[in-house]
Amino acid sequence: MKQIVGRDGGGIAVPVARAKDARRSNVHWLTPRTWRLWIDVGLRGHTPGEIPEVGWLGRLEDRNVAFVRTLTSSGLRRAEGGSLLVFEVPARQLDGGRYYSGRVAAGVTRSKKPRTFYVAADAVGEIEAYVASSRAWAVRRAQRQRLYQQLPEIRLVTEITRRVNPVVRWRNQAGVVGERKLNDLTVADRMLLYHDGSHGPEPLWLWLNECGLPFHVHSWDGVFATANRRCERVLTPSNRMGLDPHQVFAPYATPHSARHSFALYMLVVLNTLMDQKYGLSPEERRDFRQLYGDPWFMVQTLLGHASRETTVDRYLAPVADLQLRSMLAGASEPVPAPMPELDRTFARIAKESVGIQDVDMRMAPPSGGLR
């Protein structure tokens, strides 16, 4: 908390670095199965019958799916996930694991502080598949056209130091050298970074457009808008078209709703781990929380919020007053790894809360579908 001067001239306490876009009207949650439906229909071109639509081209489908899966499994903001460089993506390990950790550079975070993020292993796999397929194809085509040599400015990276606070060193087309700490690079700086590949310059920016150039962070809004329109067209029954304000039939998502949904998901999962997987008694659970913090604090840390109020009152408002332990009751034994899907748990939370989208395709009317 920090002290500021109020309207009456007196001092009042307010949260530090409260998220400016965390107004309740901006908050959207989707349950995991609803995200899967949104991705399949909106990004993969599936019909309600779970098969690709005839004639579906799937332009950059692998890129779009990888990006959304990255956001939903990591809680990264649009600018944080959208400005990743290729070497900042965690590498999968031979010994496996459900999540891998990476670092968000300070220059792209809202707080201007670096932090650790965790991303699901399958999302990392989808990024790797994208890098090896459509991204590699776009880069190679741009190289054959000598597109990168025609750009007004590129910074060809010559070295990234191996330090606690790495330094990026480069030279531009005129041979002028420069350097900056990785944590100090802005989104605009990152878009200029290239490295010398086997066939010429290659962007270090992870997400590229079809021309092989960096895909602007704000352009992801268009990807989400297109997917939302497709979900509405495909999933809304003809007699309810334009009459589904609460997204009963067709889910609606934004880049930031991925972050909201991640917060909700992690709260449920962390409560499940505490209450079921470890088989803790009430006394052991209290000791565990005293040592490591309760799930609310853990989610706050994962999101990088300076204020607990933002996490609890904004991102997790629908479940702030619910006893999650009672929702998750029923398992007499610890949950084995990997944790099974929690669709029924999220369906119950959505039913008892306001603002959480949960679309159950088993209940979809037969008249709903592709038109």
Image: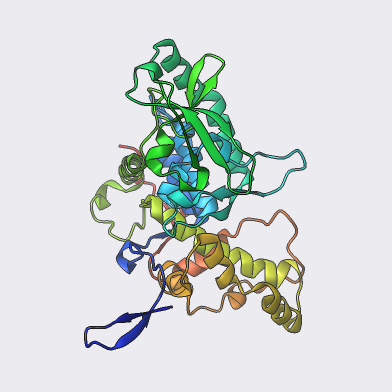
- Residue 318 in view, yes or no: yes
Observer-nearest of 292 and 366:
292
User: What residue is drawn where x is 75% and y is 59%?
Assistant: 336
Q: In which quarter of the image is the N terminus?
A: bottom left
Q: Quadrant of the C terminus?
A: top left
Left or right: residue 291 versus residue 79 is right
Instruction: Choose top left, top right, bottom left or bottom right for residue 64.
Output: top left
User: What residue is drawn where x is 52% and y is 33%?
Assistant: 169
Number of numbered discs visible in the structure rendering:
0
Left or right: residue 296 versus residue 7 is right
Instruction: Establish if 263 lies above or below 179.
Output: below
Colour approach in the figure? rainbow
User: What residue is drawn where x is 69% and y is 71%?
Assistant: 274
Left or right: residue 87 versus residue 252 is right
Instruction: Establish if 329 lies above or below 57.
Output: below
x%, y% of residue 144?
44, 10
Q: Which residue lies furthest to the front in this view?
A: 176
Instruction: Choose top left, top right, bottom left or bottom right for residue 328.
Output: bottom right
x%, y% of residue 295?
60, 71
Instruction: Establish if 361 lies above or below 199.
Output: below
- Residue 30 in view, yes or no: no
Observer-nearest of 47 and 197:
197
x%, y% of residue 132?
56, 25
